[in-house]
Amino acid sequence: MSKKLNILVPIKRVIDHQLAPRLSATNKTQITIPSYSINPFDDIAIEECIKLKEKHKDLIDKIKVVTISSDPSQTNKLKDILYKSLAKGCNEAKIIEVEGVAGKLLQPLTVANILKKEVLDNSNNLVILGKQAIDEDNNNVGQMLAGLLNWPQATNAAKVEILDESAGKIQVHREVDSGEEIVKATWPMVISTDLRLNVPRYATLPKIMKAKKQKIEISKIKLDAELSKINEAVKVLEYNEPEKRQPGIKVDSVDELLAKLKETKAI
């Protein structure tokens, strides 16, 4: 077991959660994204890594953020979230550009396989990532990556503690339907983060400007035949806006409430 932690943080650029996407009137598979930002769950993963580094300075060797591009025309635009990650305290950043997929969505198993190779190539012994991306909401990559690596995993982390540095023991509090579950494992392992784990810090402008002087590694890969087949297994047929809800109304009495409920055939 490595005495130092070499952490990989996979992150994704998604639609800004404060803005609504616009659907094309003529093409139901086309969405206009007004603005992008880092996936909120991934931002929480970055914050947790930095907090661990601040608390266990001699244990953490480096924190590396990596993002995957399926569209060469968008690769350079991904640098924004990487610079902000470096400004917050990550040590290295990388973009993996997947050639030959023409901007198509990458399926979770495809992403997990790409990350598996990255982990093995970099000798990472801890992966911390958001439990899901808010654009597709699959919540699959962390679990699949752990399975491919044959590593223990702790999903939906609400608290992460390093219990024993020399033995590589980590304790994770997980949010589950019945309340909270506490699990212990020995790294190497995969941890996926939930919303209540922490509140991410802001990257200040001076630190962002300084981070832009750092080199971002860009590597290019092609999917093999098996992964290409996996990635083509699911296709997006169309996007639809959710049904618009009727606005609420105020009532002055219980009798009026009952009358309105009967009127709408709710009772």
Image: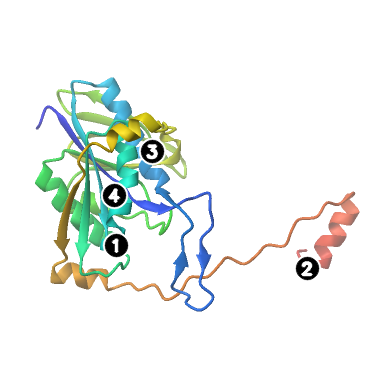
- 3D distance between C-alphas at marks 3 and 2: 44 Å
Residue 221 percent coordinates (x, y) = 15, 60
Please identify, in this view, whether the residue under mark 3 or under mark 4 is nearer the observer. 3
Marks 3/4: CA–CA distance = 15 Å
Instruction: Work out whether mark 1 precedes mark 3 in sequence or the reverse, and give the earlier one.
Output: 3
* Mark identifier at residue 44: 3
Image label count? 4
Which element type, helix, strand or loop, lies under badge 2? loop
Q: How far apart are marks 1 and 4 (CA)?
A: 27 Å
Q: Dot 1 corresponds to which residue?
A: 73
Q: Which residue is at a point 42% across and 40% down the rendered structure image?
A: 175
Amino acid type indicated by mark 3: Ile
Q: Distance between the residues labelled 1 and 2?
A: 52 Å
Residue 200, x across and y down, in percent: 41, 34
- Sequence-wise, the earlier of marks 3 and 4 is 3
The foreground one among 122 and 173 is 122
- The amino acid on which the numbered mark 4 sits, given as a three-letter code, is Gly
Front tag of 2 and 4:
4
Where, by quadrant of the figure, is residue 29 drawn? bottom left
Does label 1 or label 2 sit earlier along the sequence? 1
Quick check: 154 above or below 210? below
- Residue 36, compared with residue 128, is above or below; it is below
Q: Is residue 71 visible?
A: no
Query: Which element is circle 4 on?
Result: helix
Q: Can you tell which quarter of the image residue 201 is in?
A: top left
Q: Nearer the viewer, mark 1 or mark 3?
A: 1
Residue ID for mark 4 = 142
